[in-house]
């Protein structure tokens, strides 16, 4: 709707985590078991056509099959839709603020990384909830508590002033807040994936049943 000019831009706060698909790899019991065939299938299904699969291999030459699979799934399902939404909103006259959550989960030996849904207990300050404990353990570290405080303050600032505390994301200065043990503001951190997806909108899922 934004890209097609059917609606005007607004003030928008959008973000994603660094390792979006990692949660699903772990939940399915597949972490550590993905093969080259699995990576090839993921690239064929989700990389932008016609040259996306080759572009991913060129952009991530040292990636294992598992790393390639997680990157393309993370991009197609979460990261690139978030980025493209922010860009389309800005092009439609709105102001977009973008963040990436790079703080890794500390529970379970860190296997989850900065996974999907990690930002939920951080943003709502519910580190003592079942989900919070699953991600950060019974006693969150001071770094986790500080990251939660920063994200909550950013949400409140944005809701009340339309400014989360870092510069807006724009085409020339594509600034992004990277939330971590030591948070920074700089160029969009997933530049390789952004370049692969330039000019390619993620394909919506067909929700119409054929049964």
Image: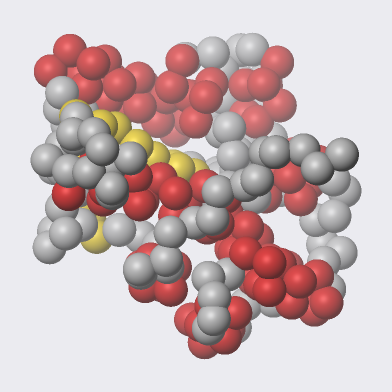
Q: Is residue 177 visible?
A: no
- Vertical arrangement, residue 86 with respect to residue 172, above or below: above
Q: As drawn, is 211 to the left or to the right of 24? A: right
Q: State the image quarter where residue 96 is shown.
A: top left
Task: In this rendered view, identify the residue nearer to me: 57 or 134.
Answer: 57
Q: As drawn, is 51 to the left or to the right of 206? A: left
Considering every residue shown, the one lying at the far front of the view is: 210
Quadrant assignment for the N terminus = top left
- Vertical arrangement, residue 204 with respect to residue 189, above or below: above
Q: Tell me which residue sits at (53%, 83%) in the image.
A: 51
Q: As drawn, is 123 to the left or to the right of 113? A: left
Q: State the image quarter where residue 112 is shown.
A: top right
Residue 153 placement (x, y as % from top left): 28, 20
Q: Is residue 5 visible?
A: yes
Q: Tell me which residue sits at (43%, 59%) in the image.
A: 201
Quadrant assignment for the C terminus = top right
Q: Tell me which residue sits at (61%, 12%) in the image.
A: 128
Task: In this rendered view, identify the residue nearer to me: 159 or 63.
Answer: 159
Q: Tell me which residue sits at (64%, 12%) in the image.
A: 129
Residue 22 placement (x, y as % from top left): 67, 50
């Amino acid at each position: 709707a934004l890209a097609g000019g059917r609606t005007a831009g607004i003030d928008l706060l959008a973000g994603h985590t660094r390792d979006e698909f990692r949660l699903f790899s772990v939940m399915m019991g597949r972490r550590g078991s993905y093969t080259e065939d699995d990576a090839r299938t993921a690239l064929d299904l989700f990389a932008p056509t016609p040259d996306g699969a080759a572009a991913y291999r060129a952009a991530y030459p040292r990636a294992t099959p598992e790393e390639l699979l997680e990157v393309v799934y993370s991009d197609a399902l979460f990261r690139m839709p978030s980025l493209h939404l922010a860009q389309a909103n800005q092009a439609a006259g709105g102001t977009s603020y973008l963040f990436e959550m790079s703080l890794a989960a500390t529970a379970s030996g860190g296997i989850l990384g900065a996974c999907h849904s990690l930002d939920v207990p951080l943003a709502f300050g519910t580190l003592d909830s079942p989900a919070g404990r699953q991600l950060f353990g019974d006693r969150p570290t001071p770094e986790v508590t500080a990251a939660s405080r920063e994200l909550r303050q950013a949400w409140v600032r944005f809701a009340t002033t339309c400014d989360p505390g870092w510069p807006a994301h724009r085409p020339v200065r594509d600034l992004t807040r990277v939330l971590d043990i030591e948070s920074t503001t700089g160029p969009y951190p997933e530049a390789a994936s952004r370049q692969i997806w330039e000019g390619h909108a993620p394909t919506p899922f067909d929700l119409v049943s054929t049964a």
